[in-house]
Image: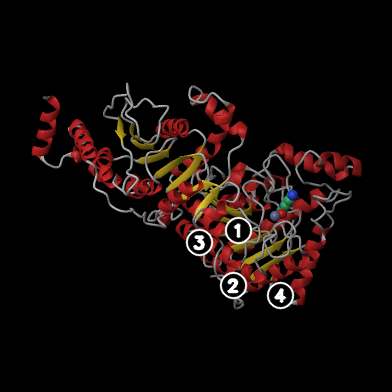
Amino acid sequence: MASGTALIYDAEMTTHKLLWSDPICDIEVPERLSSSYEQLRSYHLVERCVHVPAREGTEEEILLVHSLEHLEVAKSTQTMNEEELKRVSENYDAFFFHPSTYRCARLAVGATLQLVDAVMSGKVRNGMALVRPPGHHSQRNAANGFCLFNNVAIAAEYAKLKYGLQRILIVDWDVHHGQGTQYIFEEDPSVLYFSWHRYEHQEFWPSLKESNYDAVGLGRGKGFNINLPWNKVGMGNSDYLAAFFHVLLPMAFEFDPELVIVSSGYDSGIGDPEGQMNATPEVFAHLTHFLMQLANGKLCVILEGGYHLKSLGESVCMTVKTLLGDPVPQITGEMAPCLSAIESIQNVRAAHKPYWKWLAYEVPPIKTATIGCEGSEHFLPEHVQLMKEMDKTEIKALVSGFYADLVKEDKTLLSLGSLFVILDRILKKEVCNGITASPTAALSTAVALRHSVRFGFQRVLCVFVGDMEMIPNTEDGKMLIINICEKEQSGKTSCKHCISLNWKEDAEGNDFFSALVGFILPVAYSYQPNLTVIAVGPNRSLEISGISLLVALLQGLAESRIFAVIEDTEISLMQNVAKALVGASTPSFGIYVPPTQEKVNKIKALRGQFQQEWKMLQCSGKLSDFIFNSYTQ
Ligand code: X5A
Ligand code: ZN
C-alpha cells in the first residue's frame, strides 16, 4: 500500500467571489478556502502532507460529464461585465459568476483530477483537495447551488476511463443533497453514490422528491443510489455514526470499491448556518477513518460546502489528520441516535433491501405508520411513525383516474390523502402496519381495497365492523369481506367472498371471542390473505376491547400486515387500535360470558354454510352433518 497524504490548494481559487448583494449566495466566500488552509498550517499539517499542484481541467475532461453548451456558457462569462454576469447567473438556482469563475472552476476540476492521479498512481495513499467553486449540485447542463462543474463526478468518470475502474464509491457527507451527482450516475451501477442531507420532508433546499430515500437509482443503476434524508435539524455525532454503521458501511463493504471519493462538505458540522446540525469536528475523523478501510486505502477527499469558518477549518483539519494516520480523537455526546434518524435509517434500509445481501435478513422494525393530527403525539403510543399528508392536487390526480366512481365529493377526496400515504408504505413493505382516521370508513375501505389489489396484492382480507354502506365487488376472489354488524341486513345475502356476521357484543362481558375463534379466524386462515384491512364504521356493534382483540389476533396473518381505518377521530378507539398494532398491549377481555344459544346457533349456521369453501371451519364431520341436515330439512 502506498504511503503519504496529498494536499492540493491553490490560492487562485479564492478569486471567485460574489460581486453584488445576494443573501442566498453570500455565504460562499473565498475565506472558506484560505482560512481552512491557514488552520491546516497552524496545526502543522501542511508540512506533513505531500504538496501536489493544481492544474486546469481540460475541456475534454469537463465534457466527460457536462454538455458542450454548458461549457461554452461558462467560458463566455470570462469577459463579461458585472451586469452581464448577474444576468447569466440569474438563469440558475443559487449561482454567481465572477470574471474569474471559469478559471477557478477549471482549477477545481484539475485539482480534483490531480488528486485522483496521485492516489491511483501510488504516489500517495490518500489526499484532500481544497477547491472552489464546489461541484456536487452541478448538472450536465446547469450550474446550481454554488457549483459550476461537478468536480467529483468528473473525477469518477476520469478514473473509470483512465484507470479502467469498475467500482467507485462516492460518499457525499455535505449537508445538501448532491442532486447533480445523483442525476449523472443514476443509471450507472459502476458508481455507488451515497448522500445524506437535510431534507425536512422536502421542505429544505433543493426540495426535491428525488432526494428521498426511495430514489434508489434507475435501470441498471438500481440499488446504486443511496439517499439518507434527515427530517429534523440537530443531527449529531451518534446519528452520523449510526448512518455509517447501519447504511453506508455495510453497503460499501459489499460493493467493494476500487476507489473512494468524498464530496466533503462540512456544512453538516456544528455551527453551520445552512445545515443547523450538531456534529462536532471529531466526527469527521471517524468518518474518514472508516472510509480509509475501503479500496485498499485509496481515498480522495474533495471540498464541497461548509460555511461556518471555524467549524469548517477544524473539520478539515480532523479529516487531514486522520488521512495522515494520526490517532482518532474520542467522540463526545450521548451515544444514541435520535428517533427521527432511526426512522430515516430504517426507511433507506427497507428501500434498498432488494439490492443488498447485507440487508436481506431483516424485517423493518418500524411497525406502525400514521398521519399525525393535532396533539396526536400525546395519545399515540411511542414508536408510531408520523407521516406527512399528501396535498390536494396529488390526491386529485390519483383519485380521478381509478377511484372516480367511488369518490364524488371534494370533502371525501381530501380525507383520502392520509389513506394513500400510509397504505403505500404498507404495500411497499416499508412499514408493517398503519392506521388512519376517516370521516367515511366504508368509502375509504373500498378505495383501500381497490388500491391494494391494483398494486398487485392477490388476496386482501377485510374485516369491517359497523354499517358498511358500500360493498365492493368481490367476485374475482381478490378480496374477502367479513362484515360484523348489528342488524340483519335484508337483501344482502352472504357469499363466499362477502360474508355478513350479525353480532352484537354482550354489554355484560366479552363473548366476541367465540365468534372470533369459531368463525372469523378459521375463515381468515383458510383464505391466507397477504394484507388485512380492519375497518370500523358507524354503529359499531363491538366494544373497544373486542376490536383490539380482533386486531391482535389478525396479526397472525399476512405477515402481520394490517391497515386499520377508523371512522372519525374516536380518540380512545384510535389509541387502543394503535396500541394493539405496535404490540404495546394485550387487550383485556373483560369478563368472559358464554354466548347465548342464539349466538351459538348463528355461528353454527355460518360454519355449516361456509365450511366447504373455507376448510379451516371444519372441526367435526358429525357436527357439520348435523348442521347441514338441520338446515336442509
Ligand atoms: C455546495 C453547497 C449549497 C447551496 C445552497 C443554496 N451548496 N441555498 O453547499
Ligand atoms: Zn452543502
Secondary element under disc 2, as helix, strand or loop, is: loop
The answer to whether marks 2 and 4 mark residues whose Cβ atoms lie closer than 8 Å is no
Residue 122, numbered circle: none
Q: CA distance from mark 3 to mark 2?
A: 24 Å
Percent coordinates x, y for residue 278 in the rendering: 66, 65
For the point 78% across and 65% down, the residue is 309
Whereabouts is ligand 2, in terms of quadrant?
bottom right
The residue under label 1 is: 261
- 396 or 378: nearer the viewer: 378
Residue 45, numbered circle: 4
Left or right? Give the position of 273 relative to 199: right
Nearer to us of marks 3 and 1 is: 3
The residue under label 3 is: 249
Secondary element under disc 3, as helix, strand or loop, is: helix
- 389 or 131: nearer the viewer: 389
Quadrant where the image shows the C terminus? top left
Chain-order first, disc 2 or disc 4: 2
Residue 3, numbered circle: 2
Chain-order first, disc 4 or disc 3: 4
Chain-order first, disc 1 or disc 4: 4
Number of residues whose C-alpha sits closer than 10 Å to that of mark 4, classed few (under 14), some (14–19) or many (20 or more): some
Q: CA distance from mark 2 to mark 4?
A: 16 Å
Secondary element under disc 4, as helix, strand or loop, is: loop
Nearer to us of marks 2 and 1 is: 1
Query: Where is 572 relative to 481, above or below?
Result: below
Instruction: Look at label 4 and name its amino acid.
Output: Leu
Residue 3 seen: yes
Instruction: Look at label 1 and name its amino acid.
Output: Ile
| Disc 1 within 8 angstroms of ligand 1 (CB) | no
Quarter of the view holding residue 472: top left
Q: CA distance from mark 4 to mark 3?
A: 28 Å
